[in-house]
Image: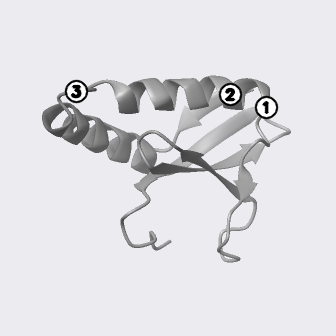
Amino acid sequence: MQVVFSKRAQRQFETAVAWWREHREAAPFLLEDEVQATVKLLTGAPFSGAPGRDVRMQDVRRLILRDTRYLLFYRVHEVRGVVEILRLWHASRQAPRR
């Protein structure tokens, strides 16, 4: 499966990476490394994440990035062979709105 980021997810990732590099001096690349490992996981096991909890976001799955405490929300488009990353959200923040 090919993994792609939505425009929103790409912006969220870039913002989070910039913040992480500036504020996490002991591990400035941890977020990038964890996202990269998750993308690799999704290429081979796209349904490894749990179904999303919000019924309004049909077919959305989520993975917890344990080291950085981010949640990665995504949707699998089986026919197209694509995993679309929809959002990257820190677990301590209020739940994202649609």
User: How far, Cα to Cα, is label 2 from label 3?
Assistant: 25 Å
Helix, strand or loop at disc 3?
loop
- Mark drawn on residue 26: 3
**Location of residue 82 (image quadrant):** top right
Residue that appears at 46% across and 74% down: 97
Closest to the observer: 94 or 97? 94
Residue 86 picture location, percent across and down: 54, 50
Hey, what amino acid is under mark 2?
Leu
State the mark number for residue 7.
none
CB atoms at circles 2 and 1 under 8 Å apart? yes
Q: Can you tell which of label 1 and label 3 is closer to the viewer?
A: 3
Q: Along the polypeptide, which appears first: circle 2 or circle 3? A: 3
Question: What is the C-alpha distance between the residues marked 1 and 3?
Answer: 31 Å
Badge 2 element: helix
**Amino acid on which the number 1 mark rests in the picture:** Ala
Q: Secondary structure at mark 1?
A: loop
The residue at which mark 2 appears reads as: 41
- In the rendered image, residue 24, in percent from the top left (x then y), is placed at 21, 35
